Image (cartoon, rainbow, N blue to C red):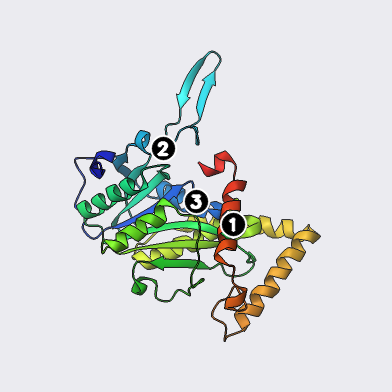
Amino acid sequence: MLDPEDLYEVDSDVPDLTGAVLLHSLDGFVDAGSAGRLVTEHLLSALDHRVIARFDVDALIDYRSRRPPMTFSVNRWTEYEAPELVVHLLHDQDGTPFLLLTGPEPDQRWERFVAAVRTLIDRWGVRLTVGFHGIPMGVPHTRPLGVTAHATRGELVKGHQPLFNRVQVPGSVSALLELRLGHAGHDAMGFAAHVPHYLAAVYPAAAVSMLDALGEATGLVLPATDLSEAAEQADADINQKVAESDELSEVVAALERQYDAFTEASSRESLLAESVEHMPTADELGSAFEQFLAEQSPGQQD
């Protein structure tokens, strides 16, 4: 294998990051409600940050599958929005440094990219790596949103109810990173915010629940005011649209009845299914993920 360290460049003035947390959210895989994107944009907007590492996107991205936007003005090309796969250095509200990996999910060289991220983790002494995104679920927006947690060690996800015993879904670089870090003895985990399937485009409330989960898991003090306000406004708009549509009202009411029935059944292990026999099979969930990806426009996938 080629040297993974050849895939990136690191700033020469990176401070001591021993014990820092690395968060990551890459574009291109499932992100229902744009939950991961909203959290990423919120953190970069609310907190001071700078890029301390850049990956070689030419070696990782298939430009013909995800063509970067270019601007043509009158008689010439004037702008090119080059994709960036970078690591940002941020500080939380208490001044604690943490890292955020953002950009397009690599189309190729997954193992080499994962190995490269691991060298950065070793180099900086990162104690915990956490990924996050949204997944579409058959739940109503009028009930508390769930978050599925997974990790390389069970102790990292104490207090989180497992959703599936075993399931197979399309892979992602983020999932592979968590798997390989676990093999190497590093602590890594991930969160998938549950997004009502009828709100899979953009849903700020899912991003708020994700931000809360990230703060609880990492100990970081993350700002939430702007994101919470956006979620409240979005919920108000959604409730108005539901009230104006008999069809939507029926869908939400049916999901509420299902959700309430499950939560009231204290003997059941899952709040989203009556029994293990009624859980989606691996093929069913895999097909649902693939359908969600296929339905996204090119602009949403990039």
Residue plotted at (73% across, 64% down): 251
Whether residue 183 sits left or right of residue 136 in the image: it is: left
Q: Nearer the viewer, residue 290 or 234?
A: 290
Give the image quarter of residue 241: bottom right
Q: In the rendering, at what x and y percent does residue 161 appear?
A: 48, 75
Of pointers 3 and 1, the one earlier in the residue sequence? 3
Residue 228 appears in the picture as rendered: no
> In the rendered structure, which amino acid carries the disc numbered 3?
Leu
Q: In the rendering, at what x and y percent does residue 225 appear?
A: 48, 57
Tell me the residue that label 3 is attached to: 38
Tell me the residue that label 1 is attached to: 287
Residue furthest bottom in the image: 267
Rounded to the nearest angstrom, the CA distance separating label 2 from label 3 is 23 Å
Whether residue 103 sits left or right of residue 181 in the image: it is: right
> In the rendered structure, which amino acid carries the disc numbered 1?
Ser
Tell me the residue that label 2 is attached to: 61
Q: In the rendering, at what x and y percent does residue 55 appear?
A: 32, 40
Question: Is 157 located above or below residue 287 in the figure?
Answer: below
Question: Is 221 located above or below residue 102 in the figure?
Answer: below
Of pointers 1 and 2, the one earlier in the residue sequence? 2
Q: Secondary structure at mark 2?
A: loop
Give the image quarter of residue 158: bottom left
